[in-house]
DNA sequence: CTAGTTGCAAAGAGTTTGCATGGCG
DNA sequence: CGCCATGCAAACTCTTTGCAACTAG
């Protein structure tokens, strides 16, 4: 029954990366951004290492991985320890990149509805609602690049 | 007011690609798959051309572009001429890859709800619900790779 | 005939892998 | 000390671009 538990060494790089992700909060970052953040400082981290850590953190469910079409590279975002994110929906603003966690009874019904009426078991952890958040609706005009 | 209307030549390649996308229906294809589909036949198409056509078709709203994390490359899928796909949601099965178009009043309410209660303007065209479809729920045990 | 289209080859960009060195426990 | 982590360089994959030949209208 060995769960092949990873030993999870506690390294400077691993700590720095996770801390950085946490500090970014609702924003998301790319591998490149992580590398550049530490670049030049005495805490520089090789990009291979960044890739590997982000990959692992994603697998552990500590961060979330996005493949946004606007960005060429994959984006990552800190989730939080509780990880009760399997139980609520996520809204991602296409304009500013913020991620909103949504605990709402109405939306919980969506899960029920999809399952009962459409025989579809939704994966709330992976599903993300894309759109435009409050700030960006009022603030800037979004559809600049209306194709 | 010139809309810079593209002239849209009618070429063999363009026709073949669109026809192929249509024939695939609810499935999705990658650039590579399109190329391989015609490869060897007398209708072979260069991959550069495939890229350019899929790009154009996406801009025209005739097909949909996905950046699924499972696949390395971008996926494309035929939508249909009416393009009323902006008015309903999409369910994508993580197990078999099928995409379901969902026209349902209840789900339409989601849009209203998010906007009124959460000040979030959802982009229904881009948002995709991930989960497990009917077939796959009953058929196979899914959570094999439960992280 | 003219302007858009095609496709090979090469360039770019992001990500992964091999391997020798370094560091945690 | 053993094993995992690190990071440089090279390999890979997907996508875009340059350019000359081709073709629809």
Image (spheres, coloured by chain):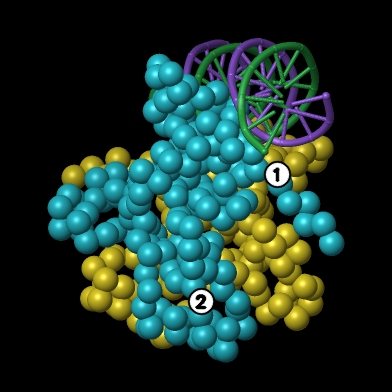
Chain colours: A cyan, B yellow, C green, D purple
User: Left or right: where does residue A124 sit relative to residue A130?
Assistant: right
Looking at the rendered structure, the secondary structure element under dot 2 is: strand
Is B100 situated above or below A46? below
* Residue B107, image x, y percentages: 42, 80
| Quarter of the image where the N terminus of chain A is located | bottom right
Foreground mark, 1 or 2? 1
Which chain does tag 2 point to? B
Residue B88: mark in rendering:
none
Say which residue appears at 51% left-offset and 76% top-offset.
B102
Residue sitting at x 54%, y 45%? B54
Q: State how many labels appear.
A: 2
Residue at the image position 65 percent from the left and 75 percent from the top: B133
Where residue D9 appears, as percent x and y from the top left, is 66, 10
Rendered location of residue B26, percent (x, y): 63, 65
> Is residue A113 toward the left or the right of residue A121 in the image?
left
State the CA–CA distance, disc 1 to disc 2: 44 Å
Q: Nearer the viewer, residue B125 or A29?
A: A29
Q: Where is residue A120 in the image (x, y as percent from the top left)?
A: 60, 78
Q: Residue furthest left?
A: A139
Tell me where residue B1 sits by quadrant: top left
| Residue placed most toward the observer, A22 or B18 | A22
Circle 2 is placed at which residue position?
B102
Q: Mark 1 points at which residue?
A: A7
Observer-nearest residue: B6 or A37?
A: A37
């Amino acid at each position: 029954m060995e769960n092949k538990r990873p030993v999870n060494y506690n390294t400077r790089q691993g700590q720095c990366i996770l801390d950085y992700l946490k500090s970014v909060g609702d924003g998301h970052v790319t591998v490149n951004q992580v590398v550049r953040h530490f670049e030049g400082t005495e805490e520089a981290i090789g990009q291979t290492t960044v890739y590997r850590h982000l990959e692992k953190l994603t697998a552990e469910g500590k961060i979330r991985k996005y493949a946004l079409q606007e960005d060429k590279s994959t984006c990552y975002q800190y989730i939080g320890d509780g990880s009760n994110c399997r139980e609520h929906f996520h809204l991602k603003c296409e304009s500013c990149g913020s991620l909103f966690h949504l605990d709402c009874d109405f939306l919980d019904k969506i899960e029920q509805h999809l399952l009962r009426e459409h025989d579809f078991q939704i994966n709330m952890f992976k599903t993300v609602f894309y759109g435009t958040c409050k700030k960006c609706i009022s603030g800037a005009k979004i559809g600049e690049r209306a194709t």
